[in-house]
Image: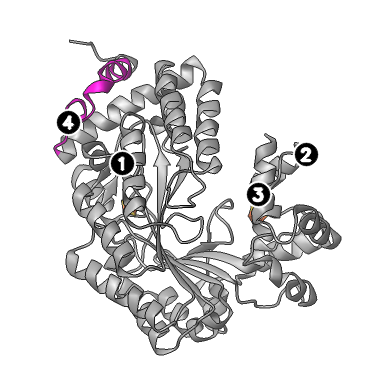
């Protein structure tokens, strides 16, 4: 898998070897992400430095003396102490597993995240400070609320209030998918959001990137408050990113577009990127992401691109069992839009990142029968035929897109044991049968081409085919 290394080295500063040597000069367990990056789940009062460790709670009493304790919790400072002392924090097992492979091509996220452009420049400061210093991170992702009008089939009550409402009305799903539900604070009386606003005047000066996530950020007044504060007190070094399902009421989408163009026109931020999600095309996409209105979504994508030439939109596709049969149409739609809004430089104004879904297991593509590998090869061929370096007026996909689809194919080819297949397929049938009942949907009307797979799952669930 030599290609991984080449690609990742391309985004590292200044080179993988340099990053490795400098990190390991402190300790073989040292990772800048533990200091420089954080995701704040303010609605639940939890955080983690990167997405691999489980979130941990931020004790409210720690916020009283210093609001940066939203990031610099006592727990995290203990993990930092372990790192500089050459001990591996247990919560970072994802990276230690990769490093223990001792393979040249297996590069752990400790190097990749530490070497990122927003992280590596902090190396000298982090090393010079005592391990227990309260540091401002350079990359912050924050969610203020789980309020969301969608209930995407792979989401859960923790992230979507509409999912939570469905559970209250109908009870849990059989295999616990989507049922996890931690205590959440109301946005207007949340002590973590209060601490965030106390920290913000100091934090924003040190930020390379601030990304708002949710729930659906356009439904949160705090999203607009952030934009107002940036307009009033410009931070021209800041990359401002927002995740949005682009399905909020028109009045909010218009307000958001007005605010983002205002930020760019007044150079109050360096750049604006909107991350959105869609995983298939047409009615199939609407089925996966309940609440999505397909035409409205694409119209909003175009309104954003139209509003300012410096706005970039990136689709985060969670590739799952229901993506495959309409994926080529999605790829075509993305190119059609990019033809209307040509790239600046080499980068498409409407990008797509393709990540494959791992959870819930009953929606992961590795449970599909072998004939779906043929569909995947067609998608790969379609991408290859539509590759371009995005120069001279042409638009197309990159090597990285092809590599990501090939990775999914490799993963599918590894397969699962008979027992795993049976369980995941039975769960698929039970989940979507109940999903259709609750949401007044009909799987076979939306995916008639998947009828034999549906029957396979029905049999696995022990139901007779009639
Ligand atoms: S060592 Fe790995 S898991 Fe731990 S913070 Fe760094 S990148 Fe994340
Ligand atoms: S839009 Fe996002 S938060 Fe809302 S249900 Fe879908 S995945 Fe969950």
Q: Residue furthest right?
A: 25
Residue 129 lies, in percent from the top left, at 76, 77
From the viewer's perspective, tell me whether residue 393 is left or right of residue 10. left
Q: How many callouts does the rendering have?
A: 4
Cα separation, mark 3 vs mark 2, equals: 13 Å
- Of labels 1 and 3, earlier in sequence is 3
Residue 442 disc label:
4
Q: Which mark lies nearer to you, 3 or 2? A: 3
- Of labels 3 and 2, earlier in sequence is 3
The span picked out in magenta is: 440-458
From the viewer's perspective, tell me whether residue 301 is left or right of residue 136. left
Dot 1 corresponds to which residue?
153
Dot 3 corresponds to which residue?
8
Q: Residue furthest left?
A: 440
Dot 2 corresponds to which residue?
104
Q: Residue furthest bottom?
A: 232
Q: Which mark lies nearer to you, 4 or 3? A: 3
User: Which residue is depicted at the point 44% across and 16% down?
Assistant: 370
Task: Give the SS element for disc 3.
Answer: helix
- Of labels 2 and 1, earlier in sequence is 2
Res 448 quadrant in image:
top left
Instruction: State whether residue 123 is above or below residue 399.
Output: below
Q: Which mark lies nearer to you, 1 or 3? A: 3
Q: Is residue 109 visible?
A: no
User: Which residue is depicted at the point 65% across and 49% down?
Assistant: 8
Task: Give the SS element for disc 4.
Answer: loop
Residue 330 lies, in percent from the top left, at 33, 40
Residue 207 lies, in percent from the top left, at 56, 75
Q: Which mark lies nearer to you, 2 or 1? A: 2
Compare residues 334 and 451 and report the one nearer the observer.
Answer: 334
Compare residues 300 and 358 and report the one nearer the observer.
Answer: 300
């Amino acid at each position: 898998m030599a290609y991984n290394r080449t690609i990742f080295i391309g985004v590292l500063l200044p080179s993988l070897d340099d990053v490795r040597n400098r990190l390991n000069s402190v300790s073989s367990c040292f990772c800048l992400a533990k200091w420089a990056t954080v995701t704040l789940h303010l609605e639940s009062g939890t955080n983690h430095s990167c997405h691999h460790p489980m979130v941990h709670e931020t004790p409210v009493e720690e916020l009283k003396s210093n609001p940066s304790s939203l990031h610099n919790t006592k727990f995290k400072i203990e993990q930092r102490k372990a790192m500089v002392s050459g001990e591996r924090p247990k919560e970072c097992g994802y990276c230690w597993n990769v490093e223990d492979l001792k393979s040249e091509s297996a590069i752990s996220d400790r190097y990749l995240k530490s070497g990122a452009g927003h992280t590596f420049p902090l190396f000298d400061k982090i090393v010079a400070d005592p391990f227990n210093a309260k540091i401002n991170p350079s990359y912050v992702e924050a969610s203020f609320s789980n309020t969301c009008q969608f209930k995407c089939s792979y989401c859960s009550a923790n992230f979507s209030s509409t999912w939570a409402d469905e559970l209250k009305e109908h009870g849990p799903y059989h295999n616990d998918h989507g049922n996890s539900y931690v205590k959440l604070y109301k946005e207007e009386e949340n002590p973590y959001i209060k601490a965030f606003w106390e920290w913000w005047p100091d934090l924003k000066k040190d930020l390379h990137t601030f990304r708002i996530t949710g729930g659906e950020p356009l439904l949160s007044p705090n999203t607009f408050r952030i934009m107002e504060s940036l307009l009033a007190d410009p931070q021209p070094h800041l990359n401002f990113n927002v995740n949005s399902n682009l399905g909020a009421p028109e009045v909010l989408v218009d307000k958001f577009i007005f605010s983002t163009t205002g930020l760019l026109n007044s150079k109050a931020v360096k750049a604006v990127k909107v991350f959105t999600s869609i995983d298939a095309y047409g009615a199939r996409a609407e089925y996966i992401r309940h609440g999505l209105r397909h035409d409205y979504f694409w119209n909003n994508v175009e309104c954003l691109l139209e509003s300012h030439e410096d706005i970039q939109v990136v689709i985060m596709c969670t590739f799952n069992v229901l993506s495959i049969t309409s994926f080529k149409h999605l790829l075509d739609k993305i190119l059609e839009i990019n033809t209307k809004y040509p790239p600046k430089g080499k980068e498409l104004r409407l990008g797509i990142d393709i990540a494959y879904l791992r959870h819930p297991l009953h929606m992961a593509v590795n449970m599909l029968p072998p004939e779906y590998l043929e569909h995947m090869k067609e998608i790969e061929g379609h991408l290859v035929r539509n590759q371009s370096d995005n120069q001279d007026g042409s638009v197309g996909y990159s090597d990285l897109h092809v590599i990501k689809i090939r990775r999914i194919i490799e993963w599918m080819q590894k397969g699962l044991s008979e027992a795993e297949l049976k369980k995941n397929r039975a769960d698929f049938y039970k989940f979507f049968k109940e999903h259709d009942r609750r949401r007044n949907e009909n799987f076979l009307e939306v995916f008639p081409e998947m009828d034999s797979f549906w029957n396979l799952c029905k049999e696995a669930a022990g139901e007779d085919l009639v």
